[in-house]
Amino acid sequence: MNPTRRTVLGGALAVAAASAVTVPAAGTPTRLSNLAHLDYLRTSVSPPPAAGHSTYGSAPLGVLWTYADRQADGSYQRIGGGTYDPATNTYGQGAYNADDIARAAIVYLRHWTLFHQASSLQAARDLLRALTFLQSPNGNVVLWMQPDGALNPSAEPVELPDPSDSGPSYWLARTVWALGEGYSVFRRTDQAFAGFLRERLELAIAALERQVLTRYGQYNVVDGRKLPAWLIVNGADATSEAVLGLSAYVEAGGSPRARQALAHFAEGIAELQAGSTREWPFRAILPWGESISDWHAWGAQMPSALAAAAAALGDPGLLTGAIGDTAGFTPLLLTAGGADNGWLPVPIDRTQIAYGVDARLQALLAIDLPGQKHLAAFVAAWYFGANRAGQPMYDAATGRTYDGISGDGVINRNSGAESTIHGQLSMLALDAHPDIARLSGETAYEGLQVVEAESAAGGAIVTPPSAWTGESQWSNGSYLSLDGTATWTLPASTHPRLVLPVVNLVDTPDPARTTWTSAGLTLGTLTHSCGPQGISAAPGALQPLTLAKPLPANATTLSARSTGKAQVDAVLLLPTISSLRIGSATLLVSVDTRPRVVDAGKRAYSYDSSGRLVARGTPLVVPGGFTVVLG
């Protein structure tokens, strides 16, 4: 979120809690952002003429190499995407792409806004000129450009839509994002260029009106649920990035049509919030309008977008979803191990990448509440070593952000455009909020655990041809077919735990039922049914369903008895109070039904399910809320 943008919430409570946030220690560099590596990825091209493609002025265009691979000597080699043909100096995809050019332009725009460095404004201008060259007369955008600037509308491997400017796309959404923020900045510095950006943004909005918003008010059925049909590529993720640009444009005096598009898109995003404080996905805003079983981190700017739209439209009601996502889902994501790439619905893709971390951080800072600011410190710590690898992912001396950490803690030390961009967006956000703590130290998690269904005694293991169902993914690539009784041995815990069996729900008049017990205690009964498939890519829906009673503390067995043939993918175990410790700071998250006082120190700040401060000093954890303990 642009650090200069106003927010709807704030005031005395936020100011009062600001003292709870530890500022960087004396001697710590005051500026985290460093554009050196992003500058290294930049270059310029004078593309050959392309019918229908033009830009502002005739100077070379600013572009950005897609990848930077680390060499044995520690240097980095810039490369493009896809197979390289040295004879023609071309890549199967291309050297530069609209997604990265758009987001890099946003980095330089925000850098200029924060530091007023003239070179950043010029870099943003050059990149925006390249982005508009990629835009076609129909308002859509070509994704790839070869090293000489030649456009490559049909890449190998094939990406949809094909050609890439034949319909709505992620890169069209990101073009709207960059043009909106670009207009907001340049209208104060170069009105002629701002006018050009406005024309191109209006062209993009017209494409969205024609290709997407004609479905406003219509709904798709997905496994019995009605989901909005007017999202860009059916995604709240892609739509959220367009909303960030539309919000900036509307706040800068954008057109009535832009305001209407913003309102409609924000409404659609808000309708994808799901779950509750005790039910998956724990108030997260789902990113994909074709699945009720898929949460992924890529492009998932939904809470930030709703906060920006709430400010631009003067509609605080839009904050409900953003607050739920940031105060509900994000804390549980943190205690489960951090900003994983995919809960599908089991946390399967445990890779962690800067775009997912940055999206969580931006959203927390967009909500002007003290609880979210406290959480931001725990998210940001990923860059500084509080992660599975136990090593920094960002190097302030070079401006590099590494390309990710695998689920088993191995760092990919390449540093391509996407990771560099989102790392810099995070550093700029932290530079704009110097009161956010820089946490460091040993990291320990006690949160959501996965027990594979196939580990049970009883039932039959089934391995489908593909783990991917078309809308979700079987954990461990298989599931347990159960028509009788199965028993699992569980890891011990001193906390009671919610039990969420992940089961395949089917649309049938005669569904299977499972009754779950532990040491003679009945925890609950599940009916394995869902509504009509609709546009979902697969019949049925993998869903974690919360049993009525928690598993008692120290219980180590769980049994299920099935009536009818049930498909069980996994069992999720969620402590009623989960935790993340980074050095001397601890985050506690409650899914309990009553307040608890815990033995966790006296410098505690307790927040409710919205992130509002409810207690200070006593380490109280309230239902659906979280507590930060310092020292």
Image (spheres, helix red, strand yellow):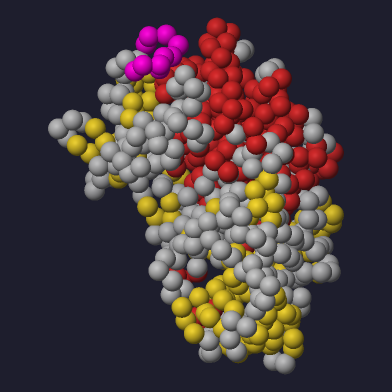
Which segment is the magenta one? 50-59
At 68% across and 87% down in the image, what residue appears?
Answer: 518
Q: Is residue 389 above or below residue 479?
A: above
In the picture, the quarter occupied by the N terminus is: top right
Instruction: Name the residue rendered at 70%, 76% in the picture.
Output: 526
User: In the shown orientation, is residue 613 left or right of residue 98?
Assistant: right
Classify residue 170 as left or right of residue 546. left
Q: Residue furthest bottom?
A: 520
Q: Residue lying at the far front in this picture: please name it.
A: 509
**Residue in view at x 65 percent, y 79 percent:** 512
Q: Look at the image and tell me in which quarter the C terminus lies.
A: bottom right
Q: On the picture, is 32 further left or further right than 71?
A: right
* x and y percentages locating residue 524 in the rendered image: 74, 80
Q: Nearer the viewer, residue 149 or 614?
A: 149
Residue 67 horizontal/vertical position (percent): 34, 39
Numbered circles on residues, count:
0
**Quick one: which residue is furthest to the left in this view?**
87
In front: 3, or 264?
A: 264
Residue situated furthest top in the rendering = 192
Q: Nearer the viewer, residue 464 or 196?
A: 464
The answer to whether 391 is drawn above or below residue 5 in the figure is below
Name above or below for residue 283 compared with residue 129: below
Q: Position of residue 213 (x, y in %)?
A: 64, 32
Look at the magenta stretch and give its main secondary structure: loop
Q: Is residue 363 visible?
A: no
Q: Quadrant of residue 561?
A: bottom right
